[in-house]
Amino acid sequence: MTNKKSRNYVNGPKLHAAIQEWYESGAEEPPKIIIDAITQICERLATKNNFKNYTYIDEMMAEGLLACVIAVQQKKYDPYRWNNPFAYFTKVAWNEFISVIKKEHRESYIKHKALEEHMIDASARGEVLDYKMDDSGRLEKLIKEFEDDTEED
């Protein structure tokens, strides 16, 4: 027995039909099949190699799920124009995951830049800090990459 999950965890045609029926019914709340499918899409996306090793994966999943639910409630998916809700909601979640990564990257930059400036200021004042700086160069690289990226924008 293998631990591999089925590739077909969301039935696209059934999801498409459920969305179309829900839109036509005029009901306020989306049916459980739609919410379950969106949840499965976000959970499976979080296991992809692009995202699975981030420490804030739960935040990424929550933001992706929220964005998909908002898209459903605002009826942004047009079942009369498109026929692949799986791709639509995967893309919505993907974009939100990337947005969280960028936000976290910026926050990490701010934190490390502030620490770097504090260390420089303390050193200039002659203070001896009992703090071991990461000597692998990883933090300096993070700061430089972020600053280089913001200069390009």
Image: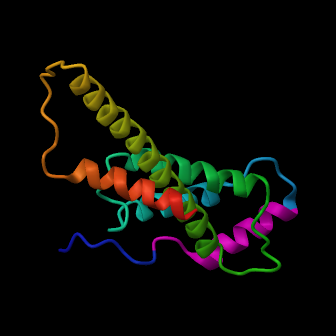
Residue 43 falls in which quadrant of the image? bottom left
Instruction: Name the image quarter holding the N terminus.
Output: bottom left
Q: How many marks?
A: 0
Could you tell me residue 26's position as x and y percent? 87, 55
Could you tell me residue 64's position as x and y percent? 55, 54
Could you tell me residue 119's position as x and y percent? 25, 30
Q: Which region shows up in magenta?
A: 9-24
Above or below, 16 relative to 112: below
Could you tell me residue 52's position as x and y percent? 32, 59
Residue 22 falls in which quadrant of the image? bottom right
User: Is 2 positioned to the left or the right of 25 in the image?
Assistant: left
Name the residue rendered at 55%, 75% in the picture.
11
Image coloring type: rainbow
User: Is 81 positioned to the left or the right of 140 in the image?
Assistant: right
Instruction: Name the image quarter holding the C terminus.
Output: bottom right
User: Is 138 positioned to the left or the right of 67 in the image?
Assistant: left
Quick check: is 17 in the magenta stretch? yes
Of residues 123 and 73, the one drawn nearer to the viewer in this rendering: 123
Of residues 151 and 91, the one drawn nearer to the viewer in this rendering: 151
Name the residue rendered at 22%, 69% in the picture.
3
Above or below, 24 relative to 69: below
Of residues 41 and 10, the one drawn nearer to the viewer in this rendering: 41
Of residues 15 and 100, the one drawn nearer to the viewer in this rendering: 100
Above or below, 126 relative to 42: above
Quick check: is 12 in the magenta stretch? yes
Name the residue rendered at 19%, 52% in the picture.
137
Name the residue rendered at 48%, 54% in the picture.
102
| Magenta stretch, main secondary structure class | helix
